[in-house]
Amino acid sequence: MIRSDFPTSHRFPTQLLVATLLFVVSVFGFGSVVSAETPTEVIEASADTGVFIARSRQDVEAETFARALDSARVAGLKLIVVVPAEPQPDARAFALRVRQAGDEVDAVLVVDTDGLIYTSVGEDYSDAASRAGDAAESGLAPGRAASAFVHELTVELVVEKPALFARVMNWAALLMVVLAVAVLLEILWRQFRKWLAAR
């Protein structure tokens, strides 16, 4: 039988050991989940600027996305840029969760802790979603990636409107030419009839 010469009064209490272990587990094991952002928190915090940046993310500034957000507003695209500390369960899924949490959110761009970009796009822009996602996730810096993302999502909308306007203007110009020719022919015909009558 092994005996301990260490006094019983100085033995480490079991209760204190359990409490210490629980504290360590709560801090290191579940700390990231407790501090993780929720989609609702992101939507509320980004309502004015269109950008949510976690306090612990000092690697990215809101101004980085100013150009992309301006382009999105001009095109009528409701975009939210998210720079989270702990996207749950991962950055791609978190982008989807944020988009679904917002009633009028068209697209979400998430910059994860490694600087990688993940996106989620609504059904209204589904035709360009793949192309826009590829542009955003091509390894560009966050600001340029966001601009490329917005460009690919909105380029067809921006191009189609002027094309339709140009088509209408072309038809209008053609109609004006036809009317002008008709008026000219009418004048010439009247002059010709007067000339015949005078003979």
Image: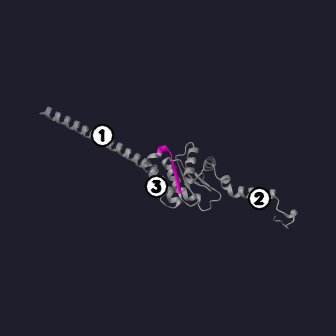
Residue 118 lies in the magenta-colored region: yes
Where is residue 162? Give x, y as percent: 40, 47
Q: Count every numbered label the image shows and give the total.
A: 3
Is the residue 188 above or below the residue 5 in the image?
above
Q: Residues within 10 Å of mark 1 (few under 14, many from 20)?
A: few
Residue annotated with mark 1:
175
**Residue most extreme to the front:** 1
Determine which of the numbered discs, if any, sits on residue 158 in the image: none
Q: Residues within 10 Å of mark 2 (few under 14, many from 20)?
A: few
* Foreground tag (2 vs 3): 2
Is the residue 173 above or below the residue 118 in the image?
above
Colouring method of the image: one colour
The secondary structure making up most of the magenta span is strand
Where is residue 72? Give x, y as percent: 50, 50
Where is residue 11? Give x, y as percent: 84, 63
Task: Quote the CA–CA distance across marks 2 and 1.
Answer: 87 Å
Does residue 188 appear left or right of residue 113 in this picture? Answer: left
Q: Secondary structure at mark 3?
A: helix
Q: Are marks 2 and 1 in contact (CB under 8 Å)?
A: no
Residue annotated with mark 3:
134
Residue annotated with mark 2:
20
Is the residue 141 above or below the residue 127 in the image?
below
Task: Quote the CA–CA distance across marks 1 and 3.
Answer: 44 Å
Which region is colored magenta? Answer: 117-124
Disc on the earlier residue, 2 or 1: 2
Does residue 42 appear left or right of residue 156 in this picture? Answer: right
**Residue most extreme to the bottom:** 5
Q: Secondary structure at mark 2?
A: helix
Q: Secondary structure at mark 1?
A: helix
Task: Name which residue type carries label 1.
Answer: Leu
Disc on the earlier residue, 1 or 3: 3
Task: Name which residue type carries label 3.
Answer: Asp
